[in-house]
């Protein structure tokens, strides 16, 4: 499975059950990247993804049911227990600091992933968003 | 009087938690029956029970985290307080010159469209600034003029009713992350966020112990933004007298007359010429000032320290 996640400067993901940030340009990039593939997500991500033209398969168990080649948009939980299923990891970095009480829990190297691509782009409300792709 | 850190907080926090559970305060703030908060006076214990509001004594000692969650992260806006159109409110300073509660319904229409202007003309209560090793304090200077409602939200510049003396740590680690969260949400959705910031002073202290920040996204009933936190006005490694704002390295003896030091280190009001492009400041008689392009030149009357606080550096020729 391929996982997409957004992180702040402290590797934070959420605060009080709310996403730290969002960005229209980033979501357009996700839409372009996942066109034609099975995109899975948790119920909390459904509204955001649909608002930006994506058609995710929603399920609380989306990580456990994801098969090889499926993409998962991850916001509300850690990933370390699924590290063995990871084929690729896409990390978007906001390059800003937000409050956080849920933090990213996986060092890509621990899952046998290495950085293969790093690009930067201007978001709709973020000066610079960094996109990192890690692969086996 | 210094902010006294009592161990009694543990008992109060337990009571507060129990009250929250019993009264259902973790629900949407529209269900709250809290009175209008007074930013400069403490809430009674009865009010604390009803609203989940924490007075200074109810807040735990700083223990390495820039903020703590209050009331299970539920803000206490009443139905009447929640607006759907943008506005901003700043309390009058009290008799000690201290800021009070500020609140706003933040929308895109009141967000700034221009760069921030100088705010160095404002000297908030407790402003006794000192410079430390930048390894200890980011940027060197202990204090920032901290916007209660952040500039990126309502575009307020030198509004003395919106600026408190806050440590660099409070500004960057305690407040900015929450402002960022609100700003991004408003820009991305076009929705509004109710935001209230209440500086908390113990007794007649001139320096706030910290700020309470409450936020609630309006159009989606808090789905996007919802928090209630207290951010500490502390700086790790620095001891602070909250009665006056005086400060010194932790473990060292406090300086006797910081004000006297300040008067000889740049807190006298003088005339300067600024080069807004190079961010240098000059004496009016400086030859470099005369050569500065008019478009980059700006006259300024104020203190040397204020200019340094705003990112200006003294000219190497006239050494102002």
Image (cartoon, coloured by chain):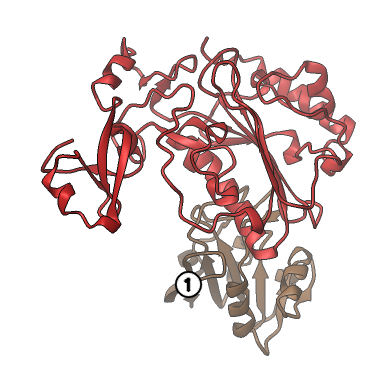
- Front-most of B96 and A69? B96
Which picture quadrant has residue A83?
Answer: bottom right
Give the side of residue A36 with respect to residue B46, left or right: left
Residue shown at the point (36%, 35%) measured from the top left: B137
- Total numbered labels: 1
Q: Quadrant of the N terminus of chain A?
A: bottom right
- Front-most of B114 and B71? B114
x, y percentage for residue B134?
Answer: 30, 38
Residue placed furthest toward the bottom: A36
Give the side of residue B102 with respect to residue B288, left or right: right
Residue A98 seen in this snapshot: no
Q: Is residue B280 above or below residue B205?
A: below
**Chain identity of mark 1:** A
Residue shown at the point (70%, 18%) measured from the top left: B42
- Front-most of A60 and A73? A73
Q: Is residue B77 above or below residue A119?
A: above
x, y percentage for residue B103?
Answer: 68, 39
x, y percentage for residue B267?
Answer: 30, 26
Residue on which the image places disc 1 = A132
Which picture quadrant has residue B28?
Answer: top right
Chain A drawing hue: brown
Q: Is residue A2 above or below residue B158?
A: below
Give the side of residue A81 with respect to residue B292, left or right: right
- Secondary element at image label 1: strand
x, y percentage for residue B98?
Answer: 56, 23
Residue A63 seen in this snapshot: yes
Residue shown at the point (76%, 75%) measured from the top left: A50
Chain B drawing hue: red
- Front-most of A125 and A52? A125
Local packing at callout 1 (Cα closer than 10 Å; few below 14, some 14-19, many 20+) is some
């Amino acid at each position: 499975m391929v996982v997409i996640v957004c992180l702040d400067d402290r590797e934070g993901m959420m605060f009080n059950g709310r996403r730290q940030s969002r960005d229209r340009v980033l979501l357009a990039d996700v839409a372009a990247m996942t066109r034609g593939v099975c995109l899975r997500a948790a119920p909390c991500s459904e509204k955001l993804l649909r608002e930006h033209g994506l058609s995710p398969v929603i399920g609380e168990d989306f990580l456990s049911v994801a098969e090889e080649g499926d993409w998962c948009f991850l916001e509300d939980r850690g990933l370390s227990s699924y590290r063995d299923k990871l084929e690729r990891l896409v990390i978007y970095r906001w390059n800003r600091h937000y409050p956080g009480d849920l933090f990213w829990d996986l060092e890509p190297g621990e899952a046998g992933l290495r950085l293969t691509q790093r690009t930067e782009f201007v978001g709709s409300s973020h000066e610079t968003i960094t996109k990192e792709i890690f692969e086996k | 009087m210094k902010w006294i850190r009592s161990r009694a907080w543990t008992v109060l926090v337990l009571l507060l938690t129990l009250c929250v559970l019993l009264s259902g305060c973790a629900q949407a703030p529209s269900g709250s029956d809290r009175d209008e908060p007074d930013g400069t006076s403490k809430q009674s214990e009865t009010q604390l029970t009803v609203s989940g509001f924490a007075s200074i004594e109810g807040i735990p000692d700083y223990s390495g985290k820039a903020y703590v969650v209050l009331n299970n992260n539920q803000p206490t806006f009443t139905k009447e307080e929640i607006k759907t159109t943008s506005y901003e409110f700043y309390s009058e300073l009290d008799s000690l010159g201290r800021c009070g509660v500020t609140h706003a319904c933040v929308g895109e229409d009141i967000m700034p469209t221009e760069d921030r202007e100088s705010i160095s003309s404002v000297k908030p209560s407790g402003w006794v600034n000192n410079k430390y090793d930048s390894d200890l304090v980011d940027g060197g200077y202990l204090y920032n003029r901290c916007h209660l409602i952040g500039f990126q939200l309502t575009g307020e510049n030198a509004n003395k009713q919106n600026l408190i003396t806050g440590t660099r740590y409070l500004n960057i680690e305690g407040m900015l992350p929450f402002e960022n969260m609100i700003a991004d949400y408003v820009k991305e959705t076009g929705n509004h966020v109710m935001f209230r910031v209440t500086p908390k002073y113990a007794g007649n202290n001139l320096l706030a112990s910290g700020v309470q920040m409450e936020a609630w996204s309006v159009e989606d009933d808090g789905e996007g933004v919802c928090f209630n936190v207290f951010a500490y006005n502390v700086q790790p490694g620095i001891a602070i007298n909250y009665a006056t704002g005086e400060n010194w390295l932790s473990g060292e003896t406090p300086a006797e007359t910081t004000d006297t030091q300040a008067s000889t280190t740049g807190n006298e009001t003088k005339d300067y010429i600024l080069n807004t492009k190079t961010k240098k400041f000059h004496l009016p008689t400086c030859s470099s000032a005369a050569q500065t392009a008019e478009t980059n030149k700006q006259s300024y009357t104020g203190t040397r320290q204020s200019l340094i606080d705003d990112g200006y550096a003294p000219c190497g020729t006239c050494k102002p």
